Image: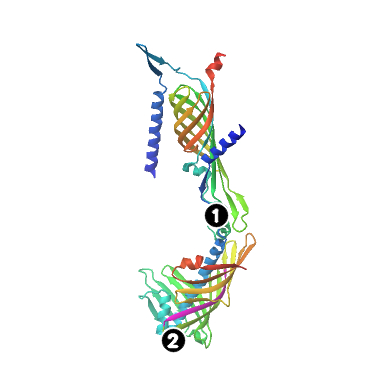
Amino acid sequence: MKRYMIVALLALMTFTGCKLGDGTDPNPNKSKQIIWSCVYDDIYSGYHHGLFAIYGEALLNDNQALAERAKQMLDLPETISVVVEEERIVLTKSNGLNPTIYTIVTKGKKLSEGAVWSLSYSTANSSDRTLATFTGKEGSDSAFAISRRDSEGPINGDITYTYTAEDQTLAVSLNCTGEIEKVGAKITFVVQPQKLFVFTNHSSVVGAVDILYKDTDRGTTKSFTAEVVSDFSNMHDIIYDNAVYKEN
Amino acid sequence: MQSTRRISMRHLWLLLLLLVVTGTLSAQDVVIERVVGEEYTTITKVLPKRARKHDFRFSVGTYMGGNRQYLHQDCWGSDCASDFRGQVSAADTYLTDRLHWGAYSLSYVYHVRRWFQFGGTVTFAATTQSRRDVVTDVKLENLNMYSVAVMPTVRFVYLYRNKVQLYSALSLGINFGSTVPLPCADMTILGCTFGSKFFGFAEFGTGVGGWGRVGIGYRLDAKKREKK
């Protein structure tokens, strides 16, 4: 009798029980991907702001080919108004009634002469906001230091670039450190000196970065290296799929 | 959204009306026609108008999508976090699939008329899920949910025979459990019992009891007890 009852019970459980799904896949790299995407955004914005300095320096050096390449890589429209004044370069993107203005304050000196430039941004609805500061290296016309700080933390480093006129290749190399403050967490990152971030023609990127993530609420840390070798055909690929993570 | 709700309510009222009308037409007397020799005999078995019986049942039912509100939560703790730290924290864990273990009901109804019975139903249902560490696979927390629905029940019998009954039923009540108390309903669109005193039954319906239920029951004949 007991046997029949157990069989009946199992049959009923089979009949009525079911898997509802809604579970999630275990992905050991998921948290690293989230942290890495945040770091990548920071590095990318450093590179992007550095392109303004390269563009400004090319304009002052009257290097039209390089200026044009940098302008393309900045995704600036053909219709942008560029005014080179004695102490600043003003780039105005007209968006109807709300133009976007980028201002590079040069104080009449080139980066290759050791100048300190600042890049600021404003719209009709917002006041001037400094995006980055560039410090030139005297005697070097293809290297400068970048320093930027947004609401989440600073990024400091060196940018070097090479332009090959034959195939119009502009390679921008970034060596930097940075910090990102989040609520309850802090990320510190260092680009590996032997594997600098090199953005080539705004279409490929290689580099490796050591990342230390600290959960300040729990007191736990996570340390790993994210290395990427990818092209820009799909931004999502770079951030998630094409990065290789190594525990430190 | 409102029009959908209006349509649903209208359907509900129509169904309720159908149940009441069919209930009153139910439980007809049994007419047997026989030819014995050259004589044609019609025997009409007049069933008692009243059938005082107590009816106890236990059943097991399947899951229904409508029960999601009682047995499911879209996100848990850090999964709901919109902040960066919460997202990173949740990413180091994963959720197992949610499992439903059946809806178990206990009910009692009193046979007021052959076609009309009323009583109450209590339905218990549970789902299990857990959060595990993505690296070690250690279980970090249980995310189980359960619901207990307490509902007054009315049942309308279409066919009342000694061994077989066909019926529909409606229950409305409150669901307690892992969520805040919420109104709940259960409807047996068509049910069938097999057996007289001890019986088995199968039902097709909708609501907290699930779309399909099977169970066993026992009828206590009040009339016989009164005679004693």
Q: Which residue is mark 1?
A: B79
Label 2 in the same subunit as label 1? no
Q: Residue furthest front?
A: B37
Chain for disc number 2: A
Determine the residue positioned at 50% across, 76% down: A198
Nearest the eye: A243 or A93: A243
Q: Please state which amino acid type lies under the numbered disc 2.
A: Asn
Mark 2 vs 1: CB contact within 8 A = no
In the image, residue B165 lies in the stretch drawn in magenta: no
Nearest the eye: B153 or A20: A20
Q: Is residue B177 visible?
A: no
Location of residue A74 in the rendering, given as x and y in whole percent from the top left corner: 43, 75
Q: Residues within 10 Å of mark 2 (few under 14, many from 20)?
A: some
Task: Read off the magenta span.
Answer: A167-179
Nearest the eye: A123 or A41: A41
Q: Residues within 10 Å of mark 1 (few under 14, many from 20)?
A: some
Which quadrant of the figure contains the C terminus of chain B?
top right
Q: Is residue A110 visible?
A: yes
Q: Relative to residue A60, is residue A148 depicted above or below?
A: above
Location of residue A15 in the rendering, given as x and y in whole percent from the top left corner: 51, 39
Q: Please state which amino acid type lies under the numbered disc 1.
A: Asp
Q: Secondary structure at mark 1?
A: helix
Location of residue B77 in the rendering, given as x and y in whole percent from the top left corner: 57, 52
Marks 2 and 1, how far apart at CA = 53 Å
Q: Quadrant of residue A33?
A: bottom right
Viewer-nearest of discs 2 and 1: 1
Q: Which mark is residue A61?
A: 2
Q: Secondary structure at mark 2?
A: loop
Location of residue B19 in the rendering, given as x and y in whole percent from the top left corner: 41, 29
Q: Quadrant of residue B133?
A: bottom right
Q: Relative to residue B207, is residue A123 depicted above or below?
A: below
Q: Indicate left or right for B81 with A75 as reference.
A: right
